[in-house]
Amino acid sequence: MDLRIGIVQSPRELEIELADDTDRDALKALIDAAISAETTLWVTDKKGAEIGINAERISFVSLGTSDDERRIGFA
């Protein structure tokens, strides 16, 4: 699953590749809780690295699909 996070006053966004078996609803709840409490959002990427994002600076969050679900080509 792909996670994109926009940061306030930053021209780039964070793109984090999460494990394919990541629970989408649990991740949404984690993001909502961090934003509501204005704390640090901690996520673990596909390789096991932990990434901390200051929730006060988040402008948007986009949850994508896994690589297997992406379509390539013209169809």
Image (cartoon, rainbow, N blue to C red):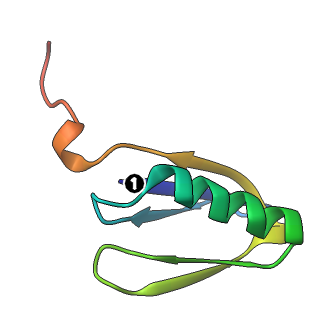
- Counting from the top left corner in percent of width and height, residue 35 is at 80, 63
- Compared to residue 3, the image places residue 47 above or below, namely below
Q: Is residue 9 visible?
A: no
Q: Is residue 49 visible?
A: yes
Q: Is residue 18 left or right of residue 55?
A: left
**Amino acid at dot 1:** Asp
- Counting from the top left corner in percent of width and height, residue 41 is at 67, 75
What residue is at 22 percent from the left and 48 percent from the top? 67
Which residue is more in the foreground, 27 or 6? 27
Determine which residue is flagged by label 1.
2
Which residue is more in the foreground, 9 or 69? 69
Which residue is more in the foreground, 10 or 29? 29
Which residue is more in the foreground, 21 or 64? 21
Q: Residue furthest top?
A: 75
- Counting from the top left corner in percent of width and height, residue 34 is at 76, 69
Q: Is residue 25 left or right of residue 72?
A: right
Residue 70: image quadrant is top left
